[in-house]
Image (tube, rainbow, N blue to C red):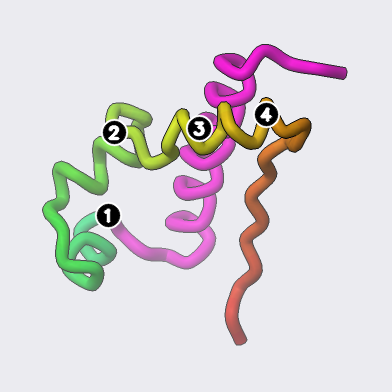
Amino acid sequence: MHLNPRLKKLMLRNNVETDLKTRFYEDGVTQTEIAEKIGVSLPYVNRIIHGREQILNKTFVRILNELGYDVELTYVKRE
């Protein structure tokens, strides 16, 4: 199935946002703690978590789409 690049980007963004929320919950970490650890502001982390800040480059997704690739992100917990 060939999806519209805009739809793919939206789906990918939604997955990233959902995945981040899940990881925060599973790891028992707050947005404040993460913001402090990575050296960014709490409002910035909050914008990412709620999809108001772009963390994916749409050109990157469009290029891979044009080359015939689907973009998938995989998260593997380090031991």
Amino acid type, residue under disc 3 in the picture: Arg
Q: Distance between the residues labelled 3 and 4?
A: 15 Å
Q: What element carries label 3?
A: helix
Q: For mark 1, what is the residue?
A: 31
Whether pointer 4 and pointer 2 mark residues with C-beta atoms closer than 8 Å, the reply is: no
Label 4 to label 1: alpha-carbon separation: 32 Å
The answer to whether 46 appears left or right of 49 in the picture is: left
Q: Which span is picked out in magenta?
A: 1-30
Residue annotated with mark 2: 53
From the image, tell me which residue sits under label 4.
Answer: 65
Q: 68 or 8, which is in the foreground?
A: 68
Q: Disc 1 or 2, which lies upstream in sequence?
A: 1
Residue at point 46%, 29% (across, down): 58
Kind of residue sitting beneath label 4:
Asn
> Residues at badges 4 and 1 in contact (C-beta under 8 Å)?
no
Residue matched to label 3: 13
- Does residue 25 belong to the magenta stretch? yes
The quarter holding residue 57 reads: top left
Q: Quadrant of the N terminus?
A: top right
What is the CA distance from the residue labelled 4 to the residue labelled 2? 22 Å
* Residue 40 versus residue 11 in the image, above or below: below
Could you tell me if the residues under marks 3 and 4 are in contact, i.e. CB atoms within 8 Å?
Answer: no
Q: Earlier in the sequence, mark 1 or mark 3?
A: 3
Q: Which residue is drawn at 16% across and 67% down?
A: 39
Looking at the figure, which quarter contains the C terminus?
bottom right
